[in-house]
Image (tube, rainbow, N blue to C red):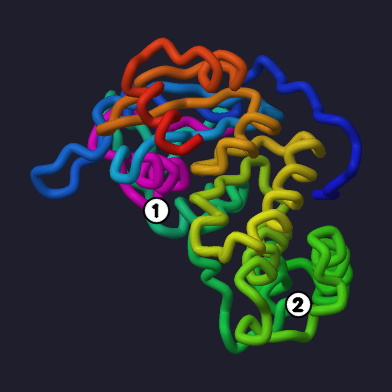
Amino acid sequence: MTITESGSVQASAEPLLTARRVRKRFGKIDVLKGITLSVAKGEVMCLLGPSGSGKSTFLRCINHLESVDGGRITFDGELIGYTQRKGALHEMTPREVARQRRGIGMVFQRFNLFPHLTALENVTAAPIGIRKIPKTKAIAEARELLDQVGLADFSHAHPAQLSGGQQQRVAIARALAMEPKLMLFDEPTSALDPELVGDVLDVMQKLAKSGMTMVVVTHEIGFARGVADSIVFMDEGVVVESGPPSEILRSPRHQRTKAFLDSVM
């Protein structure tokens, strides 16, 4: 995946990701209460909402880091995490789930880099180990990705030698190294000092302009306003409302959405 400076690519009408009545429970707590939405190819969707509204849990369900208790998620025409036989859903094996995840990159709140590996080694680990591409090719691709996220001069640095913002940009490069069709971002700037947020958001903005399909959990309203094609506001495990940024951020229909935006804008 090449991050370019070109203008935003229009999202296709064809859904790449579809969720239908997705439910998730932890103990006696219903965290997701029937989430239904779809994301078109090339679309950037931002999920907004208060802490505990189910945004991060839903993101983890998309690539089956969390199993669902009801409903279904389809990615690129394939049911995620399950196969259907004789009208019943059967959970896939870990190997089958890992195969599906190759098309989905995820960037977490915490960077989750391998501390004993350099930035370059963090980016090449999965392409060599999972994509089985030659080491020389993996290194060349990794160097290009690190250059694109502004870290060409830090390829041999270990995570402990990098700032939080730099580590997060390495994490983005690492996810892109698997050539995903969809990128998930789970509040990628929430663990960063304020002065480091801009560099990460700049990389994400370039990635969005390149046409990558993205689902972003964020509290960065300015980013959502400038980059998102659609915004989904969640609260207490349900979708309260959704629509284009101009509609949701300027004229929300629901009082709960308005109260949330008033508190963060």
Which of 6 and 177 lies nearest the eye of the viewer?
Answer: 6
Position in image of residue 148 (x %, y %): 85, 59
Amino acid carrying label 1: it is: Leu
**SS for dot 2:** helix
Q: Which residue is mark 1?
A: 65
Residue 120 is labelled as 2
| 117 displayed left or right of 218 | right
Position in image of residue 49 (x %, y %): 39, 35
The picture quadrant where one finds residue 233 is top left
The picture quadrant where one finds residue 50 is top left
- Mark 1 closeness class: few <14, some 14–19, many ≥20 residues within 10 Å: some
Instruction: Residue at 48% x, 30% y: name it.
Output: 74
| Residue 61 is inside the magenta segment | yes
Which of 211 and 203 lies nearest the eye of the viewer?
Answer: 203
Q: Is residue 154 visible?
A: yes
- Mark 2 closeness class: few <14, some 14–19, many ≥20 residues within 10 Å: many
Mark 2 or 1, closer to the camera = 2
For the residues marked 2 and 1, what is the alpha-carbon distance in whole angstroms? 26 Å
In magenta, the rendered stretch is 54-76
Position in image of residue 138 (x %, y %): 81, 70
| 15 displayed left or right of 148 | left
Q: Is residue 178 visible?
A: no
Residue 97 is labelled as none
| Residue 242 is inside the magenta segment | no
| 130 displayed left or right of 53 | right
Position in image of residue 67 (x %, y %): 31, 46
Which of 91 and 48 lies nearest the eye of the viewer?
Answer: 48
**SS for dot 1:** loop
Amino acid carrying label 2: it is: Leu
| 150 displayed left or right of 132 | right
